[in-house]
Image (cartoon, rainbow, N blue to C red):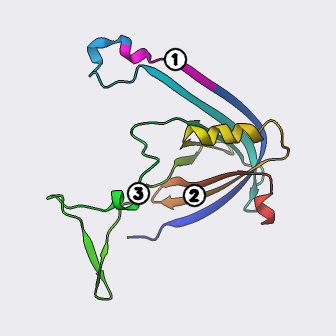
């Protein structure tokens, strides 16, 4: 098993667009496909941020588009606890391993809060991140009023996938930190 590689990324924001949506869930109108557990109302928002790489140095001509989705999805448990991530075997028994003679739980942590991938043939990367709605609200308070703004992102490279494990919208330049 290879050790995952953590990669920092700093982006200076050049542009952003926002959408805030409220609607009746159109899926519930297709009653033949519904199970009865569907939510009637749909509320979501997103911010698409564009910018260029400032950190790590080199290849500063690479541009980025990161879409940050604010939604409370049932399949994205933002209140997940460490104990919820403990691995279990086929008989639903928690798995442990021995380290220096002591039994230690084995965890299967989420890969990240989003992903980032290179667009083929051009010097551009796209990414998507899912955060609670309140995080989008906080970001919207900064975006139109403060210039310049930066994204400080930490990714983890596993196999061929680059997952985002941390994102910070901030006023200080991450290349100078």
Q: Secondary structure at mark 2?
A: strand
Residue 67, can we see it?
Answer: no
Q: Secondary structure at mark 1?
A: strand
Mark 2 = which residue?
Answer: 155
Circle nearer the viewer, 3 or 2? 3
Residue occupying the far bottom of the picture: 100
Mark 3 = which residue?
Answer: 81
Q: Residue 160 placed where, x, y %?
A: 47, 55
Q: Which mark is residue 143?
A: none
- Earlier sequence position, callout 3 versus callout 2: 3
Q: Which residue: 84% across, 47% down? A: 148
Q: Which residue: 60% across, 40% down? A: 134
Q: Residue 49 placed where, x, y %?
A: 70, 39
Q: Secondary structure at mark 3?
A: loop
- Earlier sequence position, callout 2 versus callout 1: 1
Q: Residue 171 placed where, x, y %?
A: 80, 52
Q: Quadrant of the C terminus?
A: bottom right
Q: Which residue: 23% across, 65% down? A: 94
What distance separates the C-alpha of mark 2 from that of mark 1? 34 Å
**Label 1 crowd bin: few (<14), some (14–19), many (20+), radius 10 Å:** few
Q: Which residues are magenta?
A: 20-28
**Label 3 crowd bin: few (<14), some (14–19), many (20+), radius 10 Å:** few
Q: Quadrant of the N terminus?
A: bottom left
Q: Which mark is residue 23?
A: 1
- Is 140 a magenta residue? no
Q: Which residue: 28% across, 88% down? A: 101
Comparing 81 with 58, the one in front is 81
Identify whether 41 is placed above or below 111.
Answer: above
Residue occupying the far left of the picture: 91
Identify whether 51 is placed above or below 91.
Answer: above
């Amino acid at each position: 098993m290879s050790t995952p590689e953590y990669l920092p990324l700093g982006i200076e924001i050049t542009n952003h667009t926002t959408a805030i949506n409220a609607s009746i869930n159109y899926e519930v109108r297709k009653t033949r496909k519904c199970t009865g557990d569907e939510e009637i109302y749909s509320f979501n928002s997103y911010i698409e941020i564009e910018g260029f790489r400032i950190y790590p140095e080199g290849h500063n001509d690479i541009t980025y588009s990161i879409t940050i989705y604010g939604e409370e999805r049932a399949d994205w448990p933002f209140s997940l606890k460490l104990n919820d991530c403990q691995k279990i075997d086929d008989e639903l028994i928690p798995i442990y391993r021995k380290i220096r003679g002591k039994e230690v739980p084995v965890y299967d942590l989420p890969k990240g809060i989003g992903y980032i991938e290179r667009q083929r043939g051009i010097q551009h990367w796209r990414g998507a991140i899912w955060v609670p709605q309140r995080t989008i609200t906080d970001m919207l308070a900064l975006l139109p009023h403060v210039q310049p703004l930066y994204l400080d992102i930490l990714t983890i490279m596993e196999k061929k996938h680059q997952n985002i494990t941390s994102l910070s919208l901030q006023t200080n330049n991450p290349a100078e930190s």
